[in-house]
Structures are given as structure tokens and as C-alpha cells.
Amino acid sequence: MYEHDVLIVGGGLAGLRAAIEVTTRGADVAVISKVHPVRSHSNAAQGGINAPLTDRGDDWEGHAYDTIKGSDFLADQDAVEVMSREAGEAVLELERMGVIFSRGDDGKLGTRRFGGQKKARTFFVGAITGSAILQVLYEQSLKLGLNVYEEWFVTKLIVEEGVCRGVIAIDLKTGAMHTIKAKAVIMAAGGAGRVFEPSTNALICTGDGLALAYQAGVALMDMEMIQYHPTTLARTGILLSEAARGEGAYLLNSDGERFMEKVAPDYKELASRDVVSRAEQTEIDEGRGVDGSVLLDLRHLGRDYIEQKLGYLQEVSVEFLGIDMAEQPVPVQPGMHYIMGGIKTTVDGATEIPGLYAAGECANVSVHGANRLGANSLLDTVVFGRRSAVHALEYIENVESASKTEGDLVSEKTRIQAMLDRPKGERSATVRDDMARGMTKGIGVFRDQASMEHALENLIEVKSRLAGVSIENKGKVFNTDLMFALELEFMVNCAEAVVAGALTRKESRGAHFRTDMTERDDENWLKHTLVYKDDSQENGTRVTTSPVTITQWKPVQRVY
Ligand SMILES: Cc1cc2nc3c(=O)[nH]c(=O)nc-3n(C[C@H](O)[C@H](O)[C@H](O)COP(=O)(O)OP(=O)(O)OC[C@H]3O[C@@H](n4cnc5c(N)ncnc54)[C@H](O)[C@@H]3O)c2cc1C
């Protein structure tokens, strides 16, 4: 029997930061992760983590305002205030734990400037920031003797009488299914990038945490807010970090024009991501692209600078396209990168279900609103990972015990056996690809009523094929065939919420740009969309709205 005070689903930055907090406060905690923790997707983060440090003449209000403006005023300002106030301490704490941040010639922690921000406040470790932080948090958790269920896959949350009391999971190494009981569960299961194709996200980013919470009855908030990153390597979907533009790279069209000068005269290439992606797509759509891309030009930075500061990007460009960035501009295009929407939480990580907390990319606190600023996500993971742990510990003080039952273990075993017993049918990969390409087509950089309705029709067709997805591997040990089929069901839940949110929002705001409703409409839509799973409704969803919290920054027109 497995039982803990706090169980954390996810061994990425949010999960490990939460786990370290719980362990150091003396409670019994375990992390469960479908991959080894250091293979979590946080590992891929390249560019850096934001913090307004006062010794640089920066202040939390400046970071908060840039974040709120970047969010197109959809972020809850009380949540942003918390993140910006706690950012400095969160980053310095990482340094004290052992993260070797890059330093400037003066010996101080170095910064680079990221998009949508007035100041250079992004701290980094070369172009491997996420990996460096993840390794250190993992080392710290080893030192603290953290209990990790490595390569275990959560299939269901246990919710008894409206209270979360654990999870049901498969030990992928043996195929055995178990109940893991807990007084509180923190969901830190990462994003849902692979609901779209192509995407900068790893294949494991399948929205499991969002779907598990959604299935349990929690609202997914602002799911229509999908971030398309301006610089993914043409034809590959691989990210070329914003660090390139932060270090001074230009964007050019086929005429060699720096088109961002006309779109964002002040910030140019460093306008917020939604603005730059739309500008690129406009160049491409109006015939000034180069084979469906625009060009990222770093030549003026010089070979030494490129190799020293952006070595990883140079490597990717040479390996995948055979282009030496010091000699030639590299073709880039907007690509799906991040989901601003997620499990609705308070600033303490609490969801609508007592005992269930959420942090990191699967959560929506909401600090990113309609568009996340680069380097604010790593910050979000550590600030709200820590806070969710603190508050889960306060919550369990009044919880006598974890579940006394085995939850839905028997019915979950029956459900999964029935999946394994299905007759030969479609492969999950085919259905997944059809879903994901339909999502990119319908809910892209630009969208309108017709494209979103097509995405919905595509999704309805995809859903009708789910029961026909067969699992050809009937074995127990590392049955990835089964795992992919389970992930597909999670992804379809996420896609359903994205489409429902998108069809509901009748305006353009941040990443949700409708060509049939091009204006932001604060009078009617300064609101969050909340999507609930509701099988009594025609499309399986119920959508409501809630007000945005404004503290001191009144919405104004967003100009860069
Ligand atoms: C290429 C790339 C570069 C980026 N660069 C930056 C950057 O420079 N700065 C920045 O701020 N942000 C960046 N981001 C975004 C940022 O990296 C992520 O938002 C953040 O790392 C997510 O962390 P997380 O802890 O929420 O989730 P993850 O790191 O994705 O971890 C999720 C965890 O959940 C586990 N899990 C998931 N489902 C299950 C399940 N069913 N059962 C058990 N375990 C499960 C996984 O095994 C994993 O351990 C980047 C994103 C990408 C794609």
C-alpha cells in the first residue's frame, strides 16, 4: 500500500520545487513522474528566467507591468504582483542551491533582454537554463532523500465526496496498477503542446495533468490562449530561443526589410511574442516570406559572439538545416510553444477541489493571461511550485487521513483491460496526428469563426474514432503503446477545452487573434473563460466566465 501526506504529480521544475519545500518542512512527500525527473520537459528551457533585481535599478512593479501589458491585460494583477515580488528571492535561492548562472564581465549575474520587457532582467545559464536548474533541484531532492515513483503513469485522480485523496497509476516497468493515497495532491504535470502539430514541445507534453483535473470536475481557464513562438526552425518545429533576438538578431522578409521596425517601432524584434508571430505570419501570407518562413539574421553579431552566447542555437541550425548562422540568415516561422490556459488555481495553487493543488505549466494562476512573456514560465514554476507546497501543508493539518479505500482501482483496471482487449483498429499515432494538425489549422496564429468551427468538427470526428484505437502490444513491461493511447484521450480532453474557449471569446486579445473580430473588447470580454467537462452538453463542455482582477494597472492599448 502506498500512502503519503502530499503526492506531487510531475518531476519537472514545478514538481521538484514543491517537493523540496514539503520535504524541508518535515512532511512525507513523494513525486510521481512518467519519465525520469531530469527528462521532464523543463529540461528543454533554453533562454532564462526573469527576476527584477533591485541592485540593477529594477523593481517588481516594472516587471509586473511588463507582464500585465504582455498578457494583454487578461492576467490577474494580484497574482502577477505575487510573482513579481517573489521573483528576486526565488532566483537567488536557485543560485544558493547551486545553479551556476552565467555572469557578466563585472562578475555579477548576467542578464539578457527578453521580449515585451523594458529592462534586461532575464538570468540564464548559456542556452541550457532549464536543464541547469532541473539538475540542481534534482540533486537537492536526492540529498533530501525524496521518494520518487519513477516511470509511473497516473491515469486517474481519486476524488471522494468532493475531496481529492490520491491517484491511480500504472508502474510502467511492471504494468501493475496501484492506488497511491495522499492527503493532498499537487498537479505539476506540465503543458499540452502536443495537442498541436508541429510544436516546440517534447512528445511527453500531452496535457495529462490538465485532463485529469478536468475529468475530476475542475475548470480549465483561458484555454484558447495558445502561444505561437516567433522563431521555430523552418520545417522542424524546433525552438530557436528568444535569446537570439535578446542578443540582437534581426528578422528580415524576402526583400531584406526589418519588418518589425514598422510593426513595433520601439521594441522591434523584442515586442511580445504574439505581436511578432502575427507580424511574421502577415509577411508570409502577403508574399514577402521565403518558402513559408522569414529570416533570422545574426551575422552582424559575429562568429565568436554567436558561438559563445548562443552556441546551442548554432548547433541546431547547422545540424538540422546545414546553415552556419555566422554566414547566413536562418529561416524561421511561428510555431506552437506554450499554453497560457490551464487548471484554474488561486495564488496558493488551490483548485476548486479541496486537496487538489496545481502549479507550473498545467496551472493557470493567472499570471500569463493572453500572452506569456519569455522567461516568465520558469519563474512561474518555482514561485507557484513553492507556494502550492506551503498551502498544501497548511491544508493537510486538518485532514485526518488519506483515503481509506482503494479508490477506483478496480474500475480503472477494468477500463484499461478493455482498451487492451479492443480488436485490431487504428493506431493512436494516426488519430493523434489528425487531431493535432486540425488544431493548428483551426486555432492558429490567426483564426476566425469558420476555422474554429472546422477545428470543432475535426475534433468530433477524432473523438468518434477513439474507441477504435487498438493497442497491439499486449505486454505488461513498458507498454508504451498503451501509454500513447491513454495520452491521446488526455489530449482530446485538452483540445475540447481549447476549442470551447476559443469559440466563446468574441474578441481579439493577445494570442487569440480573430480575423473576423480584430478588436479587443474590454467592455464585454475583460473576462476569463472557464471550461468544465459536462457530458450532458452537446459538445461535452460547459463554458462560463469570471472577472479579471485589476489592482493598479488600468487596461490601455498595447503598443510596442
Ligand atoms: C523548447 C522550450 C524552451 C523553453 N524555454 C523557456 C525559457 O527559456 N524560459 C522560460 O521561462 N520558459 C521556457 N519554456 C517553457 C518552460 O520550459 C515550461 O513551461 C516549464 O519548464 C514547465 O515546467 P513544469 O514543471 O510545469 O512541467 P514539466 O517540466 O513539463 O514536467 C512535467 C512533469 O509531469 C510528469 N507527468 C506528466 N504527465 C504525467 C502522468 N500522466 N503521470 C505521471 N507523471 C506525469 C512528467 O513526467 C514530468 O515530470 C520553454 C519551453 C520549450 C518547449
Image (cartoon, rainbow, N blue to C red):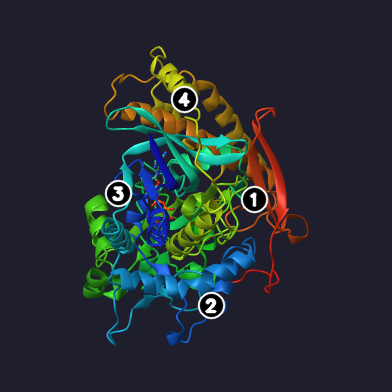
Nearer the N terminus, badge 2 or badge 1?
Answer: 2
Mark 1: few/some/many CA within 10 Å (<14, 14-19, 20+) = few
Tally the marks. 4
- Report the residue marked by disc 3: 39
Mark 3: few/some/many CA within 10 Å (<14, 14-19, 20+) = some
The kind of secondary structure element at disc 4 is: helix
Which is more foreground, mark 3 or mark 1? 3
- Report the residue marked by disc 2: 60
Which is more foreground, mark 4 or mark 2? 4
Residue 515 is labelled as 1
Q: Amino acid at mark 3?
A: Arg
Which is more foreground, mark 4 or mark 3? 4
- Report the residue marked by disc 4: 412
Q: Amino acid at mark 1?
A: Thr
- Nearest to the observer: residue 358 or residue 472: 358
Mark 2: few/some/many CA within 10 Å (<14, 14-19, 20+) = many
Q: Is residue 480 left or right of residue 333?
A: left
Spatial CA distance of label 2 from label 1 is 35 Å
Mark 4: few/some/many CA within 10 Å (<14, 14-19, 20+) = some
Q: Residue at x 64, y 60 (%)?
A: 74
Q: Is residue 92 left or right of residue 369?
A: left
Which is more foreground, mark 2 or mark 1? 2
For the question of whether residue 248 can be seen, the reply is no
